[in-house]
Image (tube, rainbow, N blue to C red):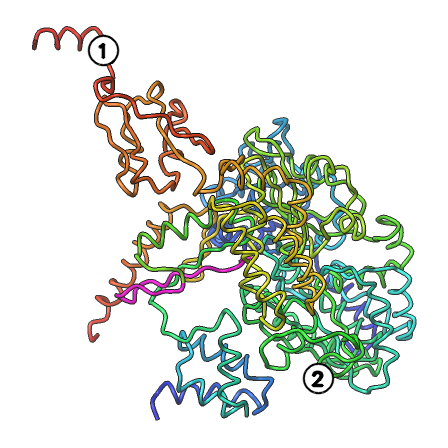
Amino acid sequence: MPRLNTPEELECFRQKILSGRDPDKPCISICAGAGCIACGANEVIEAFALAIKDQGLSAKIDTRGTGCPGFCEQGPVVVIYPEKICYLGVTARDVPEIVSQTILKKKIIERLVFKDPATGAVAVHEPDISFYKAQERTLLCNNIKIDSRSIDDYLAVGGYMALAKALGSMTDVQVLEEVKKSNLRGRGGAGFPAGRKWEGSRNAKEAIKYVIVNADEGDPGAFMDRALLEGNPHSILEGLILGGYAIASHEGYFYVRQEYPLAVENIKLAIEQARDYGLLGKNILGSGFDFEVIVHKGAGAFVCGESTALMTSLEGRAGEPRPKYIRSNLRGLWNRPSVLNNVETWANVPHIINRGAEWFNGVGTDSSKGTKIFSLVGKIRNTGLVEVPMGMSLRDIIYEIGGGIPQGKKFKAVQTGGPSGGCIPEELLDLQVGFDELTKAGSMMGSGGMIVLDEDTCMVDVARYFINFLTDESCGKCVPCREGLRQMDKILTNIVEGRGKDGDLELLEELSETAVEASLCALGKSAPNPFLSTLRYFRDEYEAHIRDKRCPALSCKELIAFYIDPGKCRACGICLKKCPVTAIDGDKEKIHIIDQEKCTNCGTCFEVCPAKFTAVIKTSGAPVPAPIAQEKRMIIKKAPKKAQKKADQNE
Amino acid sequence: MTTSDQHIDELMDQYPPKPEYLIGLLQDIQDQQGYISYGAMLLASEHTKVPLSQAYSVATFYQSFRLDPPGEHEIKVCLGTACHLNGGQQLVDGLSRKLQIEPGETTDDMMFTLSTVNCVGACAIAPVAVVDENYHAGATMQKLEREMRKVIDLSSDKIMGEPNA
């Protein structure tokens, strides 16, 4: 392995890698991100290796397991270069055919290409797929192009060019100024200007300073950091080294959540490779700048995503937040100046250094610059990661990229910002995404989770879900959060279980106000958001639960009931067999009845009742109709003539 | 000194005796032994010069630490937002009913531990369940029951396959 001693050597080495590669040589990129692996990507990778070997093509075709390109729902995703043919939902069985047909004969396999679920239009090439078309993929675009475990692949797409530029031709202050000018705001939640944070640390007097990557992506429903960590770890590392250079820090930390084992593995490997190449360690690229990185695994506490709690955790203690009378960029880890930024923020830095602050300022809105990755999930057709310029409307993201709501259901709201965020209703769909815009609507950018909710989602239950989550995750340091959330959880649980009473909403508002005003950290201060925003836009749902004991979305288990419509039941026996509590009575040709006393509302019968009958009815807020009289339960079938004759003879 | 203590000794050698290494050391111990026994916690706290009470506070603060031995197989159900919307809780209820244990508990025969996790970051393929580190996309009770039978078979094969066992 070469140790690269100057920026020129790095450039020479890059050219050497590029000259050894034929851009026209077929290359098969197979997504090996967690989502695709769950759908069988490892078997697909093995099958490709085998098929290529069997057909004696090893020298003619390259394969690589890459990071997540974002379209997880349709995984495993396979992209064939140089044509950029994109196959979705590939299984190991498809592989021999892909090699013999598409690679050798350049024939497209129709069944594996993208079909727009809304229009039925077919797209063969990756850039033509509606999911990708409206995106602007600055950070994610390399994920499918590089083997996430190969530093050479990263170098081949221009990796560490920004580091070479900074160390070779810019002073540390110039790097800092460039980031400041770019108006890059932190991607982790609050959107604090990164340059200002850096400047504070840079100007601090202490000799030892730290830079930290917050990769404790705890927001349920968000996984963009995971995609970057697993798919393009070097881009984050490069950003971190640049940050270290800019603030004169020589020690960096990755705080990665342990629920992401592959991310931990890839980032550790990236660090080793960078060290071997001389891009980490002493005298990086001959500049005299020293920098080392340590990886720390989180241990499953959501609150550790908060900057001061994360630093306490790095110090080896229970991750409780600290007061921020003095900001952590002046007094952070071990009371030393520490710049902590989110994964995505760091990944933006090399691009800013490479292309300049002006380029970055050219994308986005007045107050939010650049692109942002959202994890678009929930009740939406095309789920996955989307990277769009700031300022795109929610409607465009949900309908143009996401393809709208599946199964003809109606859109109800979109939840952004994770547990600290809020729900945005249909009337605000034209809102532009940006830090300030979302906050004004009662939600927040957060780290970029975007969870689409349809008419079947109960908004009270959504609020209860998040409050319950935060109750569990509250570190317990401050009373308004520890006790207040617990009470809120209790009251919301009462409401969804049909025990809500007048005055509950006022009490919840009071508890919210106290938590917002009197909690120490952002977790407590923003915890009531899911309740407040749903109350603001969906008060009628709360009132229906409390006053009419009715769940308008037919979702709250305690407020719904199931019964079988005797006019539709064909006594097929499926629900009867599947009911886990034997609450269904019936027989062959005898209309089935649900015993309401025994029924646990698990919904199994509703799911298994064949679509041609849809005899199981879900209801809420109205009494269940009395069961059909015993003597009317036999189904008199119009038997076919032959059978009828036989029956007559028997009689 | 028991063999497990020796293993812990070897792990401790990799960490300088400083408080900031407590979490990493406890993680390694759990990776190796499946949980943190009282003895292991005592050794770790002594090594990193952290009072035992504080080590206990750390181990109970973070969700990933386990103080009781787990079952042979672990079923983790993701309850992230996307999984919640797509029926994650129903999976937990179903598995609870099937295994007759609550989340966090282990079956009497020590075969399965059922746990829930905040988010495994595979939201696009919700609901997700993780059986022994294998992710299952679009999990249903039927799929999970099949998977459980598979791992039970594997375990019994393993026992039968070892002639000296």
Q: Which amino acid does label 2 sit on?
A: Trp
Q: Is residue A21 left or right of B20 when viewed as pictured? A: right
Task: Mark 1 or mark 2: name the one nearer the start of the chain.
Answer: 2
What residue sits right under mark 1 in the picture? A639
What residue sits right under mark 2 in the picture? A334
Q: Is residue B163 left or right of A120 when viewed as pictured? A: left
Residue occupying image coordinates x 36% and y 49%: B94
Above-or-below relation of A2 to A179: below
Spatial distance from mark 1 to mark 2, Cα to Cα?
83 Å
Count of labels shown? 2
For the residue pair A510 and A323, the one nearer the viewer reads as A510
For the residue pair A196 and A247, the one nearer the viewer reads as A196
Above-or-below relation of A386 to A216: above
Q: Mark 2 lies on which chain?
A: A
Extent of the magenta region: B104-120
Q: Position of residue A87 (x, y in %)?
A: 58, 41
Q: Mark 1 lies on which chain?
A: A
